[in-house]
Every structure is written in structure tokens, then in C-alpha cells.
Amino acid sequence: MAEEAAASGPLPVVSFLKIPDGGDPYLEGQRCGDCGAIFLGERSICSNCGVRENLKPQKLADTGVLYVYSIVHRSFPGIEVPFVSAVVDLDGGGTVKGNLINVEPTPEKVRMGMPVEVVYRIAPTKDRDGNEYLSYYFQPREK
């Protein structure tokens, strides 16, 4: 495999994380033009109502509420534990899985329904070509 140069800026860690030139990063979903359901990732069929070819890109909110979580105590080598794996219902629609940061990973500090916000950070490691990746996380927010 030929050596490739690193990208000039961070790359998105997932396809639904958008990094516009000169703008702030955001999460993008697909909204059904018939029923209004919102999904992550590109698709051509709405899994809620079954309509075809009527989904349009939608910028998702950077705020939401914690739907469910798990405190992870065992992971791959090199991954610091414990950490909080979370599923968040975003304000205005869309459900996203990610890690909850900036909170003590204990049941006393994390509660379902707590308000959270999306934050964007450079991932802690680069790939073998030297590329950095931008990732998203959730953190508690004031109501």
C-alpha cells in the first residue's frame, strides 16, 4: 500500500458528522418528507412509513436528553475505563449513541432524562497515515 499524506484537517469519525469549510461541525440526519421521522446516516427508504426517495438532509440539534446509558468497566486495551456509553434523544428529533464525558461515571451522577449537549473534540489517536479525526461526545448541560 502506498504511503498517503495526512489530510489537511481533521476527518469526521462517522459519515453523519459534517465539518463545513469555515463553519462549526454538526450532526446530520435524514428527515422523511412524508411522516417527519429523522434517522442517522443516508438512506432512500423511511423505516417509519416506508416512503421511498423522500428523505432530505437535516442538521440536528446540539442539545438533547439522556435516554439510556451504561457504565462500561471493561473495554479494548488502551481504552480508559470506566466511561459512560449513552443514547441521547436530540431536541427536534434524532437519536444518537455516543460517550458521555465531563461527568463522574457513577449511577449517582448520571441520570436518565438529564439534559446534555453535543461537544466536538479531536479523537485521542491518529490513524497510521497520521490523520486526525473529529469525534462528538455528550456532556451534561444546565437546563
Image (cartoon, helix red, strand yellow):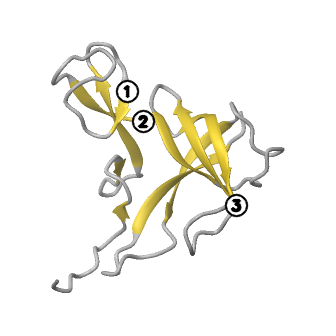
| Residue count near mark 1 (Cα–Cα under 10 Å), binned few <14, some 14–19, many ≥20 | many
Residue drawn at point x = 59 percent, y = 44 percent:
86
Looking at the picture, does residue 71 appear above or below residue 32? Answer: below
**The C terminus sits in image quarter:** top right
User: Can you give x and y, in whole percent of width and height, for residue 87 in the image?
Assistant: 56, 39
Residue drawn at point x = 41 percent, y = 52 percent:
24
User: Can you give x and y, in whole percent of width and height, for residue 57 in the image?
Assistant: 28, 34
| Residue at numbered disc 3 | 82
| Residue at numbered disc 1 | 38
* C-alpha gap between disc 3 and disc 2: 28 Å
Q: Is residue 64 left or right of residue 30?
A: right
Looking at the rendering, which quadrant does residue 78 occupy? bottom right
Residue drawn at point x = 27 percent, y = 23 percent:
46
- Residue lying farthest to the right in this orientation: 108
Instruction: State the mark number for residue 53.
Output: none
What number of labels is visible?
A: 3
Q: Is mark 1 on a helix, strand or loop?
A: strand
Please say if the residues under marks 1 and 2 sit with CB atoms less than 8 Å apart: yes
- What amino acid type should be assigned to the residue bearing mark 2? Leu
Q: Which of 62 and 101 is in front in this view?
A: 101
- What amino acid type should be assigned to the residue bearing mark 3? Pro
| Residue at numbered disc 2 | 60
Q: Is mark 2 on a helix, strand or loop?
A: loop
Q: Is residue 107 left or right of residue 121?
A: right
Looking at the picture, does residue 8 appear above or below residue 29? Answer: below
Looking at the rendering, which quadrant does residue 58 occupy? top left
User: Can you give x and y, in whole percent of width and height, for residue 126 in the image?
Assistant: 41, 76
Q: Is mark 3 on a helix, strand or loop?
A: loop
